[in-house]
Amino acid sequence: MSCVSGCHCVKCGAAVPAPESAGVCPACGDESAVLEIDFDLDAVRTSMTREALASRPGNHWRYRELLPVEPDEAASGWPVGWTPIVEVPRLSQWAGVGRLRIKDDGRNPTGSFKDRASSVGVVHAVQHGAERISCASTGNAASSLAGFAAMAGLPATIFVPASAPEPKVAQLLIFGADVRRVRGSYEQAYELCSAECALHGWYNRNCAINPYLVEGKKTCGLEIAEQTA
């Protein structure tokens, strides 16, 4: 069970209603006034015990009390997270440190850390009745969104600058995404994506103004803490 208790602006601190998609503080009104999801940590402590964690699946949904969504039966089986921590002795020797380990998020479904965010964003979009999800990206975020949208059966439109690498664009098309090439920079692709989301009511997955995505990303830190305890 999610333990979301509210939402606040990181700039002015005001409590604001949690948006259905992306959004910034209505009082501040600019993109530096991003929103952050709040959790009832007392409720989290009560239910997310060591014993409870030991019985849960090996994916990022194991931290469901600290996530803003509750996955359905299909999404709860997505193999996201609980990636291994690997010893890298040669790299530690090169870096001149006694011991170095890496968190191998290349094991995630589309091969990147961004899967933690996209999985949460897609589930949130579906639960709020979104008919389409969209983002602007030149790389892993786009691939991740396209993959998880396909798994959820949610149409995705992805805006990429014309300079985006062909292999990346091909991956988006393989996942069935609607790809819009923009004759301009990433910033122009981002602005066009945001405008189209506002015009058509699409779910906006752009992480700069969507407060739900970072909640998925933080599970990497939670896993490191649990795996190294």
Image (tube, rainbow, N blue to C red):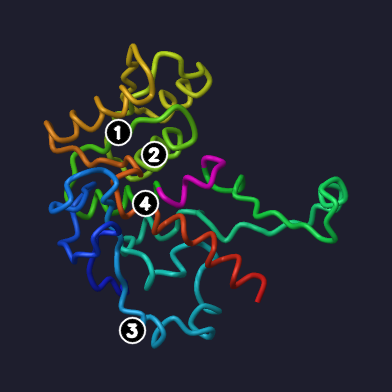
What residue is shown with label 3? 43
Q: Nearer the viewer, mark 2 or mark 4?
A: 4
Of the image marks 2 and 4, the number of the one nearer the N terminus: 2
What residue is shown with label 4? 213
Query: Is 161 rendered above or below residue 221?
Result: above
Instruction: Verify CB contact (< 8 Å) between mark 4 and mark 3.
Output: no
Query: Is 50 rendered above or below residue 152?
Result: below
Task: Give residue 178's position: percent from left, percent from top.
Answer: 31, 24
Q: Residues within 10 Å of mark 3 (few under 14, many from 20)?
A: some
Between 146 and 134, the one lying in front of the other is 134
Number of marks present in the image shown: 4
Task: Give residue 202's position: percent from left, percent from top.
Answer: 19, 37
User: Could you say which disc has been placed on residue 145 in the image?
Assistant: 2
Instruction: Verify CB contact (< 8 Å) between mark 1 and mark 2.
Output: yes
Q: Quadrant of residue 2?
A: bottom left
What amino acid is labelled 1 in the image? Ala
Between the C-alphas of marks 2 and 3, the distance is 31 Å
Who's the residue at 51% across and 54% down the image? Answer: 79
Identify the element where label 4 is drawn.
Answer: helix
Quadrant of the snapshot with the N terminus: bottom left
